[in-house]
Image (spheres, rainbow, N blue to C red):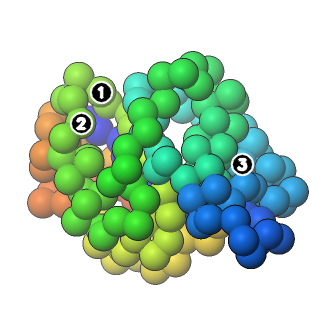
Amino acid sequence: MKTLFLVRHAKSSRDDPALPDKERPLNDRGRRDAPKMAERLAKRGVKPDVIVSSPALRALATAELFAGKLDYDVKDIVVDQRLYAAAPDDLLAVVHGLSDASHRVMLFGHNPEMTELAHRLSSKIVDMPTCAVAEFRFDTRSWSRVGEDAPVEATLSSPKRS
């Protein structure tokens, strides 16, 4: 069984229009929502084997806040450029390249590609608000099957709905 979590970064600040997109930080709401969402997962006993994040500050900060609540060492977060300004196929390529020794993986990235990949994996997911977590369980031994095999379960939670 493989479990994939797609996490859209928490709400970011647009206060400084001169700041490059990759350097936009989380705003106050984002800094509140990310630990809240991670705590929901922690209460369910979720322990990721691997966390992969976009290099953008807002995504990486979200991943770090989740890691802190999920007993995952922040220094072990994998930063992958393919999760920034990517197409859904790029995100799927990251998933397909994961080690099959890992069973629970979290990807932290951006919209619209997170929503597009989530919708591709399960048509019932049509929108991922900021800090939403889409969770997919696949009855497979290989990450290379994700996207070919339908998930046996797909859920979406967000700060405003569980």
Taking the image as drawn, is residue 133 in sight?
no
Q: Which mark is residue 34?
A: 3
Which is more N-terminal, label 1 or label 3?
3
Residue at figure coordinates x 79%, y 69% from the top left: 16
Residue at figure coordinates x 59%, y 25% from the top left: 74
99 w.r.t. 135: above or below:
above
User: In the rendered image, which quarter contains the N terminus?
Assistant: top left
Residue 69 image offset from top left, x and y in percent? 69, 30
Bin the neighbour count of mark 3 within 10 Å (Cα to Cα): few under 14, some 14-19, many 20 and up: many
Asked if the residue at tag 2 contacts the one at tag 3, i.e. Cβ–Cβ closer than 8 Å, the answer is no
150 w.r.t. 96: above or below:
below
User: Hey, which quadrant is residue 161 in on the image?
Assistant: bottom right
128 w.r.t. 75: above or below:
below
Residue 79 image offset from top left, x and y in percent? 43, 39
Dot 2 corresponds to which residue? 98
Q: Which mark is residue 102?
A: 1
